[in-house]
Image (cartoon, rainbow, N blue to C red):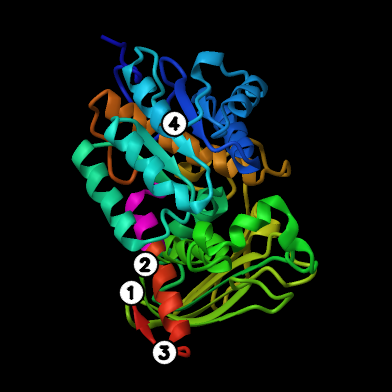
Amino acid sequence: MEQRLFSNSIDVNGAFPTLQRRLRLGVVGGGRISGMQAMAARMSDYWEVVAGALSSDPQKAKAQGEKWRIEDERCYSSFTEMAQAESQREDGVDAVMITTPNHVHFEAAKAFIEAGIDVLCDKPLTNEIAESEALLTLAEKHDVVFGVSYTMSCFPMIRQAREIVQSGGIGEINQIHVEFMQDWMVPEDVSDADHVKWRLDPKKSGSTSCVGDIGTHAAHLASFVSGHKLTNLRAEMHVCGAPKPLEDTVFMTTRYSEKIPGTLMATRLASGNRGGLRLRIFGSEGGIEWSLDNCDVLKFNRYGEPDQVISRGHGHGVSPSVERLIRAGRGFPEGIIESWANLYTEFALAVAARKDNLAIPDDWLAFPQLAEGVAGVRFIEATVESHQAEGAWVKL
């Protein structure tokens, strides 16, 4: 019997605990995003990458595995083979990250769930709502941990914003605005790049490109911080640059909990914008504002009082639950890799708790889970439905 991962006692109010060993992580998909996520997983100090299905070509899979320092026998050319083999090993993977193009997510996730292996999957979860709901049923049946890579929710200042808003710091919310403005599709020949082709291919990306890729991040972030579900939207999807088979821009009016109005905009044609993610939530007593380009800072105001600027770092207004997601002191910047590392930290603790058959408080870990991935797919389908109905209101 394998040793427990947690020590005998856990202080859920203090820093996140170390485990008795690093967890074993498998990788499905060998693109550049998988490299970034593996880097973040290692940074968390909870994971080591030990297996991978990095290409469907056996020779390329072995060559990629060598670069990743994965043993030859654990370099697979299919996720099905990997799930079966790893589930039979005494030292098999504890979890797998799925970083393939969208159309592979369902079958890959299904294979590992059925093998009893925990999963962290890129977003959007699937291209079809029926598939995402099937994963929800399977995950519940096999009792696995399933996380979704809505990484923006793992920035410390986003967690701080969430605590402020949900503790009533800005009063009763009266509007929510979120935008994700990028510019990497401005060049007319951008569609020729290998990492772009699948994002514009309906067979792989699904019914949307911009909406599914970055619009879902914006929608998730707004609900995550506000605590309100996105319930209604009306949307217009556009191709603003060179002709493309899928949209590069979306503008929408939104409602949360059926009553709180808002806006959501996402584009890849906003010249001069790189990160471009911005969230603003206003209430009866104040507001908060955060942007990806300045992710270490949160603007918080109470109406009629001096504005506050809370910066990431230990102390100085940062709550204890946020501090455990911080690695560097104030004045030393952190970024997207650290945010992913926070995701992999919380995911690791959930995986370890499942393996130790340990009950943990519901509010201890806040990483995005499977139900949020399903909501993201519903958001995509509602957006397409509204656009096709010439901007009519659609209820999610």
Identified at 36% across, 69% down, the residue is: 228
**Label drawn at residue 392:** 3
Task: Tell me the mark number nearer the camera, choosing from 1 and 4.
Answer: 1
Q: Are marks 2 and 1 in contact (CB under 8 Å)?
A: yes
Q: Are marks 4 and 2 in contact (CB under 8 Å)?
A: no
Q: State the separation of the CA atoms marked 2 and 3.
A: 16 Å
Q: Please give the range of residues in magenta.
A: 365-376
Judged from the image, the secondary structure of the residue bearing numbered disc 2 is: helix
Q: Nearer the viewer, residue 282 or 273?
A: 273
Query: Type of residue at label 4?
Result: Phe
Crowding at dot 3, Cα within 10 Å, few <14 / some 14-19 / many 20+, comes out as: some
Query: Type of residue at label 1?
Result: Leu
On the image, the x and y values in percent for residue 325 come to: 52, 40
Q: State the separation of the CA atoms marked 2 and 1.
A: 6 Å
* Location of mark 4 (residue): 16
* Location of mark 2 (residue): 378
Query: Type of residue at label 3?
Result: Ala
Which comes sooner in the sequence, label 2 or label 3? 2
Judged from the image, the secondary structure of the residue bearing numbered disc 3 is: loop
* Location of mark 1 (residue): 396
Q: State the separation of the CA atoms marked 4 and 2.
A: 33 Å
Judged from the image, the secondary structure of the residue bearing numbered disc 1 is: loop
Task: Tell me the mark number nearer the camera, choosing from 3 and 4.
Answer: 3
- Quadrant into which the N terminus falls: top left
